[in-house]
Amino acid sequence: MIPKPGKPDYIKVWAYRVILLLDVVSKLVEYTAAHLISDHLECLRGLNDGQFGCQECQSCVDTVAVLINCMQLAWGQKQMAGALFMDIKSAFNNVNKTPLSKCMQALRIEPDLIQWTGSFMSDRQVKLLRDGNLDRQH
Amino acid sequence: MPSIHGLSFVDNIGWWASGKDDEEVAAKLSAVAKGAVEWAEGNRVAFDHGKMEAVLFHHKKIRPTARVMVGPNPIPFNKEATWWLGIWLHSQLMLKDHHDIQAKEGK
């Protein structure tokens, strides 16, 4: 785990950036599954038009460029423009398997991929190595 | 909701709205924030209030007094540049702040 700069309390686990060390086969399977789901959603246009994440050739910079363009269009109409930025708290840690599975079914994702995703999120164990010391297994 | 638009990158969400003044923009953003918070509650997720930021984009240097309400929490429009998705956004849409800050960090 790498400490994030400027955090007030380094006792807390979220003060660290975690480097996840999966074995190579797991990494390949995870990457392939993510790619298949992403391709399917792109073909189906299953994601909201405003969602730029997990899509080919769309980056953070593209998202900001679209925002800037929208602001400039508003200015062109003699309007003021404002934005509100929100962040989902611990989004990845708090994904609930049941609604996710239902959502994937509604998007007609292959049943095998839905099952694999459920399995991937089940019975996970992690060992934390902090300052060279191995913490207990979680 | 008409005249309010959303952009997102995975779990980072940006809503934007336009209006004749900061009060109107803040009111529109407050309305969309209310809907977003209700959606979050229905989907067992929560927004990180500490990371919420509002920014008013305008040509001239003005000091907006309106605030965006997210539930009971008022979010004032930032006076300084706002960091979103790795870019420092200046209220006048200049990238000078981004350039200066990144150059300073790179030294």
Image (cartoon, helix red, strand yellow):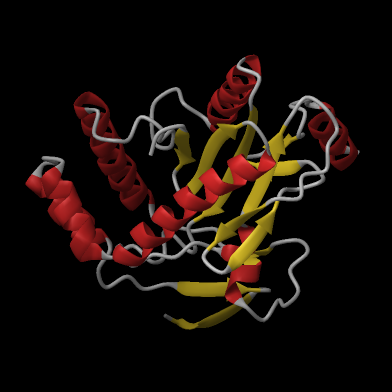
Question: Is residue A81 shown above or below B77?
Answer: above
* Quarter location, residue A46: top left
Q: Is residue B42 left or right of residue B27?
A: left
Q: Foreground residue, A115 or B71?
A: B71
What's the residue at 63%, 25% (across, down)? Answer: A79
Where's the C terminus of chain A, which quadrant?
Answer: bottom left
Residue A54: x, y in percent?
39, 36
Q: Foreground residue, A72 or A62?
A: A72
Residue A39: x, y in percent?
26, 30
* Quarter location, residue B2: top left
Question: Is residue A130 shown above or below B42?
Answer: below
Residue B71: x, y in percent?
51, 65
Question: Is residue B70 shown above or below B20?
Answer: below
One can see residue A47 in this view: yes
What's the residue at 39%, 25% (across, down)? Answer: A56
Count of numbered badges drawn on the protein:
0
Q: Is residue B15 left or right of residue A109?
A: right
* Quarter location, residue A49: top left
Question: Is residue B69 shown above or below B99?
Answer: below
Residue A87: x, y in percent?
53, 54
What's the residue at 25%, 42% (across, down)? Answer: A33
What's the residue at 36%, 48% (across, down)? Answer: A27
Q: Is residue B60 left or right of residue B20?
A: right
Query: Which residue is farthest top?
Result: A76
One can see residue B87 in this view: no
Where's the N terminus of chain A, which quadrant?
Answer: bottom right
Query: Which residue is farthest left?
Result: A111
